[in-house]
Image: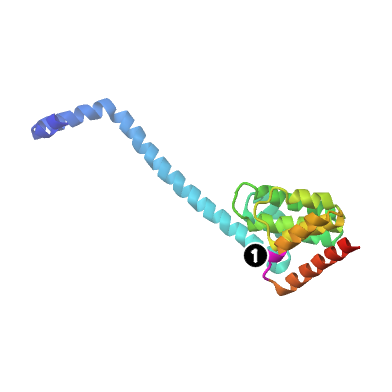
Amino acid sequence: MANFFSASQEEQQEILLSFWQRFKYLIILGLIAIVLWIVGRDYLIVSSQQKDFETASLYQAYLETDDQESGKKILNSYADTIYADFVRLNEAKRKFLNDDSAKAIELLQTVISNNNSSDEFNPLQAAAKTRLSKIYLENQDYDSVISLFENTEEMTSTMLEQKADAFNSLGQISEARANYMLALQNSTNQASRALINMKISDLEGEELE
C-alpha cells in the first residue's frame, strides 16, 4: 500500500487496472451481493409491516363486528402472531359459554404453549392459565389445576387463589391456607381480599371441627 501512494499517477492507474483485471469478478459479485442484501432487507421490512397491518385490521374487524370469518382467517393465515392468541383467548371463552369445554381447553393450551419460551412474566400466558384453571375447577379437575401452576414462576393473586381452591377441594388444608395467604398478600382489590379472608376463615373453622 505504501508503494501505491508513493507511485506516480500513471503507476497508480496501472496498479488499479491490474487489480481490477485480477479481481473484477469478485468485486462485481460483492457489489451484487450488497445490492441483493439491501433489496431483500427492504422487502422483508415492507412485507412484515404489510402483514402487521393486515392482521391488525382483521383483528379490529373481529372485535368490532364479532366477525367470525376474520377470526378464522387470523387463525389460519396468521397463526404465529400475537393476534392469533388474542383470538384464541376470546374463542376459548365463547366455547366455554357454549358448553364446549374440550375445545376451550385446547385453545387455551395452545396459547400457553405459544408463550412458554420466556422466563419473564407473560400476560397472555397468565390470562390463558387463569381461564384454563377456571374451567378445570368448574369440571372438578383439581389435580389439573395444581399441575397447571406447578412450574409457574410468577403467579397472580387470582392464580394463587385458584390453586388454593383446588387444594381445599382435595382436602389439603395446609397447602390451601398457604396459597390463600399468598393470594391475600398479592391482591390489591378489596372485594377479592374480603373473599379470600372468608375462605381462610372457613379453613380455620374446618380445622377446629
Q: In which quarter of the image is residue 51?
A: bottom right
- Left or right, 16 with reference to 200: left
Q: Quadrant of residue 83?
A: bottom right
The residue located at (9%, 33%) in the rendering is: 6
- Left or right, 13 with reference to 119: left
Q: Is the magenta stretch mostly helix, strand or loop?
A: helix
- Tell me which amino acid carries mark 1: Gln
- What is the quadrant of the N terminus in the image? top left
As drawn, which residue projects farthest toward the front? 208
Question: Mark 1 Cα within 10 Å, few/some/many (few <14, many 20+)?
Answer: some
Which is nearer the eye, 175 or 157?
A: 175
Q: In this view, does 161 lie above or below 26?
A: below
Q: Residue 195: x, y in percent?
A: 78, 70
- Left or right, 126 with reference to 44: right
Q: Is residue 10 visible?
A: yes
Q: Residue 117: x, y in percent?
A: 62, 46
Q: Can residue 90 be seen in this view?
A: no
Residue under numbered circle 1: 60
Magenta-tinted stretch: 184-188
The residue located at (71%, 74%) in the rendering is: 190
Which is nearer the eye, 135 or 171?
A: 171
Which is nearer the eye, 140 or 127?
A: 140
Total count of labels: 1
The residue located at (24%, 27%) in the rendering is: 21
Q: What element carries label 1?
A: helix
Q: Residue 73: x, y in percent?
A: 69, 54
Q: Is residue 56 above or below residue 106?
A: below
The residue located at (88%, 63%) in the rendering is: 208
